[in-house]
Image (cartoon, grey):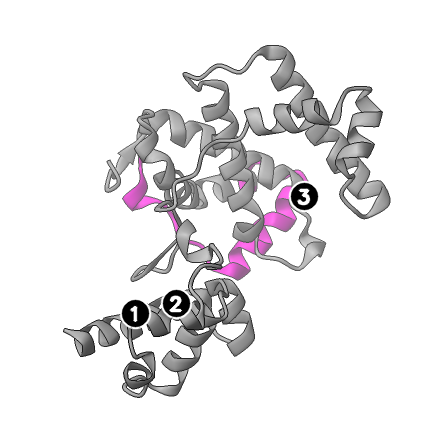
Amino acid sequence: MINKVEICGVNTAKLPILTNKEKEELLIKIKQGDIEARNQFIKSNLRLVLSVIQRFYNRGENADDLFQIGCIGLIKAIDNFDLNQGVQFSTYAVPMIIGEVRRYLRDNNSIRVSRSIRDLAYKVIQYKEKFNKEKGREPNIEEIAKEFKVEKEEIAFCLDAIQDPVSLQEPIYNDGSESIYVMDQVKDTKNSDENWAENMTIADALKRLNEKEKTIIRKRYFDGRTQMEVADEIGISQAQVSRLEKTALKNIKKYYK
């Protein structure tokens, strides 16, 4: 299914690929009300929809249904995209597509959440967005509870009830050669210098790594940093951190075999 070429009657292998300049020109025309430009832009971004929905294939949902829902998210992104924000369209669109698919999965979940709880949760989400726009910050739970005249526990419960469980093995990024998973962004608070020292003489192993690999291993496993934090600190992408970390761990394992 992941390698499916035709989906909803669309041959994704034959979809057009536009340059950034062509995309910008189409977006300008779309904002001016050009329907043909809108259709062309939607068509050129269907590959983006396909790449996003792949992460949801393990939910047992029909691929065509997911693709159609993803297209709704794409269209919403086009309608709401602001050219003056200075970000690429795909950066803005991906969360919109993901959000639309997750809403669909939530509403069609076999574990049913009562309508009243779901309605309250959506009202709270809308209130949080409005509050953030007006005040420039997220409202705390006391402020939300006061707005809706309910207990804090009820607010926490309704928001928790509509959340989807996420697997630690769920991919969140792929650059074509390496995938980054949820577990790669989880901070490690258990592995400390002392715990490593009890299990292995890490100093000898580190000598066999280059400087960048040493830095990544120290920050990840001694300091408990996430891959994203390490990437920001040493000035490379998270995908590069992931690759270097895997190579370093592989080399350390070889040393101890």
Q: Residue at x 47, y 73 (%)?
A: 219
Instruction: Find the residue positioned furthest to the top.
Output: 115
Mark 1 Cα shell of 10 Å, populated few (<14), some (14-19), many (≥20): few
Q: Residue at x 33, y 83 (%)?
A: 206
The magenta stretch is 10-37
Return the residue nearer the eye: 253 or 94: 253
Image-quadrant location for residue 197: bottom left
Is residue 3 found inside the magenta-colored segment of the image?
no
Give amino acid for label 3. Lys
Image-quadrant location for residue 239: bottom left
Please tell me whether mark 1 sits on a helix, a strand or a loop. helix
Please tell me whether mark 3 sits on a helix, a strand or a loop. helix
Please tell me whether mark 2 sits on a helix, a strand or a loop. helix
The label shown at residue 199 is: 1
Instruction: Find the residue positioned furthest to the front.
Output: 198
The x, y position of residue 49, in whole percent, is 43, 40
Q: Are marks 1 and 3 in contact (CB under 8 Å)?
A: no
Return the residue nearer the eye: 80 or 128: 128
Return the residue nearer the eye: 158 or 235: 158
Q: Residue at x 77, y 39 (%)?
A: 140
